[in-house]
Image (cartoon, grey):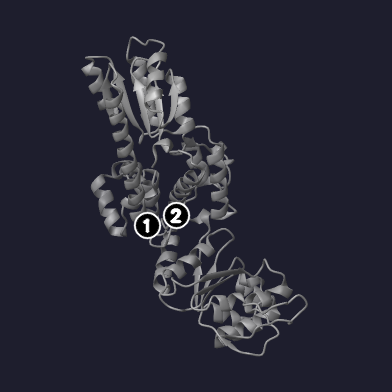
Amino acid sequence: MTEDSRKLLIVEDDPGLLSQLKWCFEGYDVFTAEDRPSAITELRRHEPMVVLQDLGLPPKPEGVEEGFLTLGEILKLAPHTKVIVVTGNGDQENALHSVAQGAYDFYEKPVDTDTLKLLVDRAFNISELEAENRRLQNKLHESPLDGIVAASEGMLAVCRMIEKIAPTDVTTLLLGESGTGKELLARALHRLSPRAENKFIAINCAAIPENLLESELFGHEKGAFTGAHKTTTGKVELANGGTLFLDEIGDMPLALQAKMLRFLQERVIERVGGREEISVDVRVICATNQNPEGLIKEGLFREDLYYRVSEITINIPPYRDREEGRLILARTLLLKCCKSQGRAINGFTEDAVQAIESYNWPGNVRELENKIKGAVIMADGKLVTAADLGIEAGEGRGESFNLREVRQQAESKAIRVALAKCFGNISKAAEMLGITRPTLYDLLSKYGLSAEGYSKKSTGL
């Protein structure tokens, strides 16, 4: 990182000293403040990595109370920020107290600019190393399924299936409502397969007009139809050696279904207007948000094609049915959106948590991601509220508990929800569940659970 991209906030009420410090650090991206309110405003606006702060601030610059309040508020809003406190000559006690409160270092007046610049430089270097370390730690805790959050029983079962079938070439059908992450899982199947180094080609059968879909899939020869000025390779042929993902296959026209069946049976295609058979080595993954058996009864989908594309079927649970993983996925998406928007938001307020848990989420994960994107943009503070999300805490369905479920399922779910709410803190989760820590450890062992995956470190918050 270059010096001019390093953001430094200087909090100093002495105009002469402030001018001297600005000159000293002219190679940096310097912001200034004269009191606590303006310091907090600049901190929120620019999110500096290092803050150089005088302890004596208005309205009582001769005291240190306002300085300590400012320090505490800065560290609460931006805990990773390095704060260097500037104290009066011989003021050792307050200097040590500021470090105990969380300041990175202190410097006693009178100011020697060379020494102070060395301290600030070191603070930036440490901050950058820590940020890189956090990035690497987060990378270590990433799911082997490339970002898929599997914290509920249903999604854990889905991921176990993905891991088992990924190394094979079995044709797979993904069933799930719109927005549940079917393409994400299809890409996970590809990335975990021996074909990972080759192409992943996706085509949405519902998004392309019927008269063009065959050409898109199988390609066409020059002159095959009006406008076919050159021979064009189709999606199936482009995926040779890799994976072909047919999204919304339930919308594929009946006439084209017969040709698709032949391709799946013989792994050969003919381009539109061509006579040559072309062999293709490709793994096929299909997906639909419809009920294939219902389509078959209505005569809209070939039964023989259904059995061919569903050698293995994976049912993806909707977001509303992932009770114990709902909050973890929301936190993961919040972190992702904060990074893309350059915002420093620390989490959700209690009313936002209640809203996420009670809302019905008809649009599933896609709707959740869209609402969180909007909330990150609209949020004024360091926490996202229910109002930022555009939903109310009591909106949608309330929490429901099916008493006919067996005790093990109920216990496992309750433990996962508690761990999610407490970020994996064993003591707090045990208190929430009304049991002792040893009992909770026994239950974690019994159900093969680990608190580590629910920690703030694992979600990056």
- In-front residue for pair 220/244: 220
Q: Where is residue 92 in the image (x, y as percent from the top left)?
A: 21, 18
The residue that mark 1 highlights is 407
- In-front residue for pair 196/407: 196
Q: Is residue 400 left or right of residue 73?
A: right
Q: Label 1 to label 2, Cα distance in Å?
A: 9 Å
Give the SS element for disc 2.
loop
Q: Is residue 205 left or right of residue 15?
A: right
Give the SS element for disc 1.
helix
Q: Is residue 392 left or right of residue 106?
A: right
- Residue positioned most to the right: 226
Q: What residue type is labelled 1?
A: Arg
Q: Name the residue at 56% across, 83% down.
A: 264
Near mark 1 (Cα within 10 A), the count class, few <14, some 14-19 or many ≥20, is few
Which quadrant of the rendered structure holds the N terminus? Answer: top left
Q: Which amino acid does label 2 sit on?
A: Leu
Q: How many marks?
A: 2
Near mark 2 (Cα within 10 A), the count class, few <14, some 14-19 or many ≥20, is few
